[in-house]
Amino acid sequence: MKMDVREALLERLKEAGGRWVSGESLSADLAVSRTAVWKQIGRLREEGYEIESSSRKGYLLRGVPDRLLPREIRSGLDSKVFGRREIVCFPETDSTNSRAKELAARGAPEGTLVLAGKQTGGRGRRGRSWFSPEGAGLYVSLVLRPKVAPVEAPKITLMTAVAVCDVLAPRLPSPPRVKWPNDILAGDRKIAGILTEISTDPDAVDYVVVGIGVNVNIPARRFPKEIRERATSLLIETGRSHSMTAILRSLLEAFERAYDLFRDGRFPRLLGRWRDYAGVMGRYGRIDQVGRGLTGKIENVDEDGSLLIRDDRGHLHRIVSGDVTYL
Ligand code: BTN
């Protein structure tokens, strides 16, 4: 009941669009005492809402917090599943992917969203770590339950890269690029990363956890020295800070659009868009894999997301995992 009053109160203050709302009209509209209104205003302030009060004029909403609050994420969100199901927010956790995997293993449905304000053990691909400072990056994991064979699952990573690029493209001065398999770059520096983890039976996928990390408001000096030359953020690229909530909302919407295409058997269309963002066909690259290296011309990315590279002797290699460096 209390929560409903708070929600309704906030709704009224938002509707007022920057104008004062009297305590009297609030208490009448919400059918609670003026003391109750005052109490809930206090709660909203604790959550980070900037609300002015005046004994004569009432209350005025000055600012909405850019903390990841489920209510703010959902407000104006144009999606049906992602962001609409359970949202689990941790002020701090080691890795949102680890939390999401635990939830998925206990039966969490598709669309479950796990967020963290900061990660103390953010994980990257190939055993690397992901720099996850407080309040300056998005750390998002989504639970999926696609009804597909395990071999289809890598397509989800490519699909996610397209969604992340769609979100960043309108916000960056020049389009983002995707570096196989799923590094998202602005210029030559990494701005976002994707870590997909799959739990599967022999013939069907049980669940997939897609983890997305986006460097939003991280200033250059905050990156550890070892990655400072290779990492960037939206703040660095655009010279201003961005609303984390707004980016998360677009991410959930873009993800849902891409996932719908994937489920409707329209992966080739996504792959085409992935190739546009990659723009590396015909370039020379070196692949570093455990135990060996390979240099050649990048010819294509095939339907299951493998990289096709032709070495100098004319042999075509199909690379399933590794890191590529453009030469
Ligand atoms: C990479 O480029 O190596 C992938 C980085 C993925 C980072 C995200 S942040 C949210 C989620 N939780 C993690 O521990 N990792 C992913």
Image (cartoon, rainbow, N blue to C red):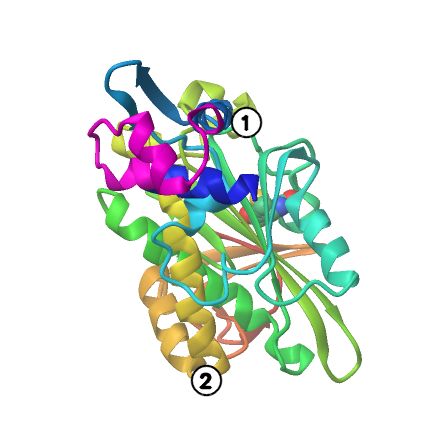
Q: Quadrant of residue 282?
A: bottom left
- Residue under pointer 1: 134
Where 86 sits versus 93, above or below? below
Check disc 2 and give the amino acid type. Asp
Residue at x 48% of width, y 75% of height: 314
Residue 188 visible? The answer is: no
Where's residue 88, x and y in %? 62, 47
Where 21 sits versus 283, above or below? above
Using residue 271 as the reference point, say whether residue 311 is left or right of it.
right
Observer-nearest residue: 54 or 86?
Answer: 54
Q: Quadrant of the N terminus?
A: top right
Residue at x 72% of width, y 81% of height: 204
Using residue 236 as the reference point, say whether residue 153 is left or right of it.
right
Where's residue 74, x and y in %? 43, 51
Query: Residue reaching furthest top?
Result: 55
Q: How many marks?
A: 2
Measure the alpha-carbon separation of dots 2 and 1.
Answer: 37 Å
- Residue under pointer 2: 264
Q: Is residue 298 magenta?
A: no
Where's residue 275, x and y in %? 36, 68
Give the main secondary structure of the magenta stretch. Answer: helix
Observer-nearest residue: 120 or 286?
Answer: 120
Check disc 1 and give the amino acid type. Glu
Q: Are marks 2 and 1 in contact (CB under 8 Å)?
A: no
Instruction: Determine crowd level at label 2: few under 14, some 14-19, many 20+ residues with C-alpha closer than 10 A.
Output: few
Disc 2 secondary structure class: loop
Observer-nearest residue: 231 or 264?
Answer: 264
Specify start and end residues of the magenta stretch as a single range: 12-36
